Image (tube, grey):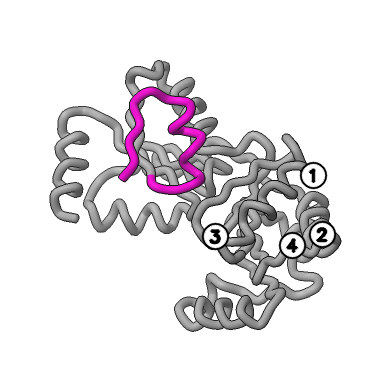
Amino acid sequence: AIAEEEEIRALIEEGHQFVIATGRGYGDIEVVANNLEIPIPYAIVQNGAFIYKDGVEVSANTLTLDLINEIFAFIRAEKIPAEYISVTDDQWKMYIKTLTWKGWGVRRVYQKRDKHRHVTMKKTTLKTLEANNHRFCKALLLIQSKNIPAAEAKLKAHFGDRLSIFCSSNSSIEICAAGVSKAAAIRNIMAMEGLTEEYIGFVGDSGNDVGVFESFPHTYVM
């Protein structure tokens, strides 16, 4: 909205740093920043798996292939009713393994929009990516809203603090490496800049923002 865009620019002109924190990749942040014509001093991407400063990666916390394979095996063993599971790499490509016909249909829709970014996962895809030094930012389960609470509870009970698990929307569960969160990323930036909590304001709208709402005093829901 125009009013919000003007408020963001006004904050920047007053000397505040405006940081975008998202579950998406750095390329998405660049699009938003270019549209708003604003700088990107810091960027928190993939729920905090990566932090960028002035376009340069300064922090990374990614999933191992062994853990991803364990997630896949757990989903099969527990018959978690996901439509598909996807894995995003550090090139911001989403590799999608469909588990139902509905998942297949959603993947086809994504691929019609951008076939280079949404890729069909084959049996050896992730192993090949790892061999070529790709890193894995997060896994995502597409799942009906009614099935999310039970699925999220099972995942958290099994993996505990070995993974960070977020219900990020009414149709998705996102899984990142241990310790990954927007709140942790903000604290990393605070340490880099020598800031304390009273200097932080946060606006969010999703399940992966809950940790920030719980951790900082000046937070707002859109």
**Residue 123 in picture, x, y percent from top left:** 80, 73
Residue 148 relative to residue 129: left or right: left
Residue type at mark 3? Trp
- Is 207 colored magenta in this rendering? yes
The tag on residue 92 is 3
Q: CA distance from mark 4 to mark 1?
A: 13 Å
Total numbered labels placed on residues in the image: 4
Residue type at mark 2? Glu
Residue lying at 46% horizontally and 33% vertically, measured from the top left: 212
- Name the image quarter holding the N terminus: bottom left
Q: Nearer the viewer, mark 3 or mark 1?
A: 1
Give the residue pinned by disc 1: 158
As drawn, 109 above or below 180? below
Q: Nearer the viewer, mark 3 or mark 2?
A: 2
3 or 1: tag closer to the N-terminus: 3
Q: Residues within 10 Å of mark 3 (few under 14, many from 20)?
A: some
Residue type at mark 1? His
Q: Are marks 2 and 4 in contact (CB under 8 Å)?
A: yes
Residue 10 visible in the shown view: yes
The tag on residue 78 is 2
Give the residue pinned by disc 4: 80
3 or 2: tag closer to the N-terminus: 2
Q: Are marks 3 and 2 in contact (CB under 8 Å)?
A: no
Residue lying at 21% horizontally and 28% vertically, measured from the top left: 15
Residue 127 visible in the shown view: no
**Residue 30 in picture, x, y percent from top left:** 36, 54
Q: CA distance from mark 3 to mark 2?
A: 29 Å
